[in-house]
Structures are given as structure tokens and as C-alpha cells.
Amino acid sequence: MTEQDAEKLAGVLGQCRELVHLNLNGNFMNFGPSGAESFVGVLAQVAALAHLDLSGNWIGPRGTKCLAGVLPQSTALAHVDLSYNDIGAGGAESLAGVLGQCRELAHLNLSHNQIGQAWAESLAGGLAQCPVLDQLYLGYNDIGTVGKGRLRASWCGRASALWLED
């Protein structure tokens, strides 16, 4: 998907206010900063969107930062899959700053994203701000033994899924 494709998609999405499920898995959306801003900027207008699957698109840190800017405005969003997006520490930090504002978010998949231990430890400290989150997938991210330990400790007591394995 090119930058122009992303802008076209954004134009159409803005008219789909009742769209509940959007699956763009595996489209390799290397659409650049402008395309990312166009695409994710319109997501907040899709008020009914509950499920967003952008896995396998390599949106990178910059695309993730754009997405993080609109996630709190997407009030119905309960399921987000960002696996295989090469978001790295920069993208993960952008997400960490808004997760506590995503009150309906119950399922988050960030596996296979080159997220390191420092971010995992930071997330562990903020999980209490995400009371609805009951499925968190962080496998294949090199978060280390200490990061995994902190996440498990902060997750304790939830009857849900925390996936940390590599």
C-alpha cells in the first residue's frame, strides 16, 4: 500500500461511521508519514470501530506514534492487533503514554515488534490504569527476564491472558 493508497482509504473510512471491524492484516502499509497521518487521523471519526487489525504492516515507530494519537478518541475500540509492525521502542513509548486513556481496550497484541525490556517495565507500572485489558500479547520482543517478571507481577490477579513467551 502506498502513501496515495492510504490517503484514498482514509477518504473512504471517513464515510464509514458505523464500521465495527477493520482488518488490514498483511497489507505491508509502508505508506510513509503523510499516509500514516491521513489513515489514522480518520479512525477517530469511525465511532463504532471496535476491532482494528493492522498486523503485518510494518507501520514502524512513526506510524505507531500517529496511531497512539487517535486511540484515546476511538472510544469503542476494544481489540487492537499491531503484531509484526516493527514499532520498536519509539512506537511502544507512544502507546504507553495513551493506554490508560483507552477505557474499552480489552485485547492488545504487540508481539513481534522489537520492543525492549525498558518499555516492558514501564508498561508493568501502568497496567493498573488499564482495568479492562484482559489479553496482552508481547511475545518475541526481547523484553528480558526482568521485564517479564515485572509484567507477570503487575498482571497477577487478573483472570486473563498475558503472553510473554518467545
Image (cartoon, rainbow, N blue to C red):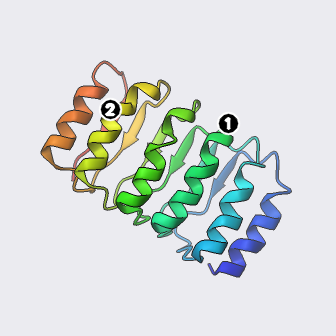
Judging depth in this view, the residue of 32 and 16 nearest the camera is 32
Picture coordinates of residue 21 (x, y %)? 67, 49
* Location of the N terminus (image quadrant): bottom right
Q: Distance between the residues labelled 2 and 1?
A: 23 Å
Picture coordinates of residue 63 (x, y %)? 54, 64
Relative to 66, is 49 above or below? above
Q: Which residue is drawn at 50% across and 26% down?
A: 132
Look at label 2 and name its amino acid.
Gly
User: Label 1: few (<14), some or many (≥20) within 10 Å?
Assistant: some
Q: Please, which residue is most extreme toward the left here?
A: 145
Judging depth in this view, the residue of 44 and 51 nearest the camera is 44
Where disc 2 sits, the SS reads: helix
Look at label 1 and name its amino acid.
Thr
Q: In this view, does 128 lie to the left or right of 105?
A: left
Residue that label 1 marks: 75
Residue that label 2 marks: 125
Q: Is residue 68 left or right of residue 93?
A: right
User: Label 2: few (<14), some or many (≥20) within 10 Å?
Assistant: some
Picture coordinates of residue 17 (x, y %)? 82, 48
Where disc 1 sits, the SS reads: loop
Q: Residue 47 carries which label?
A: none
Q: Residue at x 54, y 35 (%)?
A: 105
Picture coordinates of residue 64 (x, y %)? 51, 59
| One can see residue 54 in this view | no
Mark 2 and mark 1 lie on one chain; the one further toward the N terminus is 1
Q: Is residue 71 left or right of residue 57?
A: right
Q: Which residue is drawn at 56% across and 73% down?
A: 29
Relative to 92, is 101 above or below? above
| One can see residue 41 in this view | yes
Judging depth in this view, the residue of 6 and 61 nearest the camera is 61
Judging depth in this view, the residue of 49 and 128 nearest the camera is 128
